[in-house]
Amino acid sequence: MSGRPRTTAERFARLRRDQEAYRRIVLARRSHARFRRDLAVVPHVFLLPGRALMAPLEQPAEAVRLALRGEAVWTLDTAARLVTGRGILVSADLTGYLTERAFGRALADGLIGEPWAGGLSVTPLFRRPLMLIAHLTDEPPAAITLASGDRVVHWSFLIRDILGTLGWRPDLLTRLEAARPTYFIEDERLAASEPP
Amino acid sequence: MGEHLILGGSSGVYGVSATISAFTEDVDLLVDADWAAAHPKAVLTLMRRLGFEHLPGTPTFTSPAGLSVDLVGYSLRDVADRIGGSEALPVMVYADLSRLMSIQGTTLDLPGGGRALSPAALALSKLLTIRLEKGSKDKLQALLIIDENAEEPEFLASLRGLFRAYPADRLEDAIADAQAACLAIAGDVALAGVQAAGYAPMHRAVERGLTLFIQLAGIEEARP
């Protein structure tokens, strides 16, 4: 590759190339019916360093989830499984918002092992034990309490978390939305209309 | 040539912010391509006198110290991407930039002399820039400018007004691009770890900028 600046003619050719490639990207985006709707979504980074921790489960996932019921606000794959009955990720980790104290208690009670120093991901490229992936916060996002007693993030926040973690996945979002039960939609409408 | 050249591109960030990074040190100067076409010798002579060498066939001038200056064209008589200027000094003319420069109040006078794009105009130009390789950088700078000026009513009104000058679908695409840029930096945040703690506040600023951009563009959040 030459270090010389591009000529104006080369710049024009490059602009045309970029515009053509961009046109294809735009067409692909707009081929999804939900394109305009998802423009309003501000992605939320669930795996924020310093806030997110990942620790291996020392008990069966079901037992850990039950032990953290009422304390965790589940999101991503765990919320999807609880709300729709189906997950969105192959690695069925427990993913949720927890206070530092609740996370510490889970560790002290032997529900989880020591947090891993690296490899923080909800889509690991290698097989690893099931994890509790927690975003530690004293102010968890607003939650809906399911009939089971589990708390999950609101639908709109789940979409934000998915975008902020996996990128814009219209196929996945559409599938997930289609599986959303009516009672969840109604509960969320009620919660949204309640004063804070 | 001060009245004819306007600080823009990433170097335009120097004109509007003391905190946001311009990322690179090359300088983009916006120029009316029709004026440049009429005065090529004057431009080349003056730049040579200032110590800059013109690279033939390009809009680029370089100094012995390594500073690189690019002329970036706009036109007040048409809105089209084309090659303008003259044979001696050809410059790229950008349609989006031409539309922007035809709107009143899109430049500001710099305290040290010269002109630069206003914060709102710079943000918009970066939101609309289409570049396959460096697109995210433009969007991040735009979102940081929006966040930095979030409390300035004049900026907000100006940006809202500029949005109205462009077709709605261009803004929709710009939002989608900004979301993707936000995700790109989110990926950096996730991978950087605590050693690169500076990423986290920058990401929050980008996120606030995106939120405000969506609001100003009039995109409503869909209810469940």
Image (tube, rainbow, N blue to C red):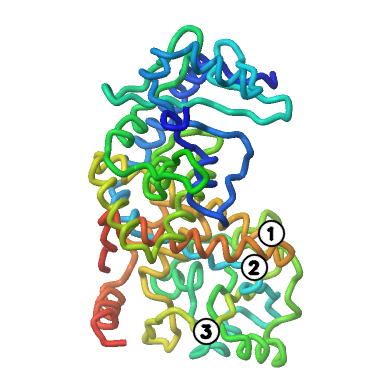
Of the pair A10 and B79, the residue shown nearer to us: B79
Distance between mark 1 and mark 3 Cα atoms:
26 Å
Chain of the residue where label 1 is placed in the rendered structure: B
Crowding around mark 2 (Cα neighbors within 10 Å: few <14, some 14 to 19, many 20+) is many
B127 sits left or right of A1 in the view? left
Looking at the rendered structure, the secondary structure element under dot 2 is loop
Q: Position of residue B129 (x, y in %)?
A: 43, 37
Q: Position of residue B38 (x, y in %)?
A: 39, 13
On the image, numbered disc 3 is attached to which residue? A72
Q: Please indicate, yes or no, whether residue A1 appears anywhere in the rendered image.
A: no
- Respond whether the residues carrying marks 3 and 2 are from the same subunit: yes
Q: Position of residue A159 (x, y in %)?
A: 40, 64
Q: Please say if A152 is above or below A109.
A: above
Amino acid at circle 2: Pro
Q: Position of residue A123 (x, y in %)?
A: 60, 58
On the image, numbered disc 2 is attached to which residue? A49
Distance between mark 1 and mark 2 Cα atoms:
8 Å
Labels 1 & 2 near each other (Cβ < 8 A): yes
Q: Residue at horizontal 59%, vertical 79%?
A: A136
Of the pair B85 and B160, the residue shown nearer to us: B85
Distance between mark 3 and mark 2 Cα atoms:
19 Å
Of the pair A59 and A20, the residue shown nearer to us: A20
Of the pair B111 and B68, the residue shown nearer to us: B111
Amino acid at circle 1: Ala
Q: How many discs appear?
A: 3
A159 sits left or right of B102 in the view? right
On the image, numbered disc 1 is attached to which residue? B192
